[in-house]
Amino acid sequence: AQSVTQLGSHVSVSEGALVLLRCNYSSSVPPYLFWYVQYPNQGLQLLLKYTSAATLVKGINGFEAEFKKSETSFHLTKPSAHMSDAAEYFCAVSEGDTDKLIFGTGTRLQVFP
Amino acid sequence: DSGVTQTPKHLITATGQRVTLRCSPRSGDLSVYWYQQSLDQGLQFLIQYYNGEERAKGNILERFSAQQFPDLHSELNLSSLELGDSALYFCASSVRGRASTDTQYFGPGTRLTVL
């Protein structure tokens, strides 16, 4: 079965600093990978997704992620954090034949002024 | 606003009771998914429907059931509720239910509290 592991349940950065949220996947077949963001008391919003078209995926709000097959990773980055980026971020993998999303445990991002 | 609506927003009930959560997908979306988010289990896939038919099942308890109606809205029925069923229940929808081409759009969720 496919799975994703998010390293670090909490990440804190200063405003303007690099954001790096880590995600490693486990899959026996080429996966579809996703990053979602959840703001307090809201649903999940898709940031970006990898579907094998390009290894560097650009998403909304200045986020991007790079698919690295050799490292089975799909880390999320943003060059400069904003206060508004404070939220919980979930990495997810899709099981191809059913298309259900398998989520990681989430990483809470705090941004300090 | 994702275009997916869920009602009610909050639900407080007692153990042993039965509740129904409702979801209206985005206009044009044929596939509906239900997820449960709890502190101890995280975000878990429960069940998926496509155009009225069940397509995939996840960690859904036998006490829970769902259906998708001809107008494509979906309902999740939770019965014989236990304290551990307290969670945020999300509905998501996509056009055809294919991750390679579609995006799952999530509703704002229904927060269920079982006392």
Image (spheres, coloured by chain):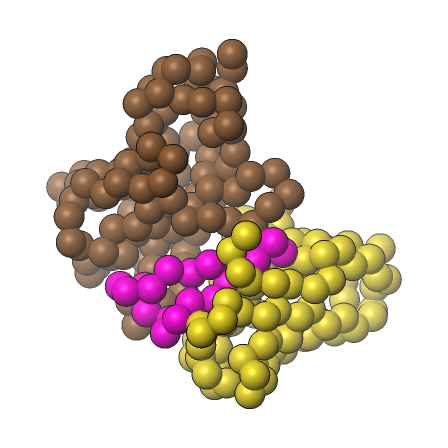
Chain colours: A brown, B yellow
Q: Nearer the viewer, residue A40 or B71?
A: B71
The x, y position of residue B39, in whole percent, is: 62, 45
Q: Position of residue A61 (x, y in %)?
A: 38, 35
Quadrant of the rendering where the C terminus of chain B is positioned: bottom right
Q: How many marks?
A: 0
| Residue B57 versus residue B8 in the image, above or below | below
Q: Main secondary structure of the magenta part?
A: loop
User: Which quadrant of the structure image shows residue A77?
Assistant: top left
Q: Position of residue A75 (x, y in %)?
A: 29, 36
Residue, x 36% and y 40% (percent of image)? A60
Q: What residue is shown at x 55% (from left), y 39% (from top)?
A: A39
Residue in the picture at 51% in, 28% down: A84
Query: Which of the two residues, B17 or B74, is positioned nearer the viewer here?
Result: B74
The reply to whether residue A26 is in sight is no
Please determine whether, in this image, residue B6 is positioned above or below residue A15: below
- The x, y position of residue B98, in whole percent, is 32, 69
Q: Which residues are magenta?
A: B92-109
In this rendering, position of residue A17 left or right of residue B108? left
Residue A28 in which image quadrant:
bottom left
Seen at 76% across and 70% down, the residue is B19
Residue B17 forms part of the magenta stretch: no
Q: Is residue B89 left or right of residue B114?
A: left
Q: Is residue B101 visible?
A: yes
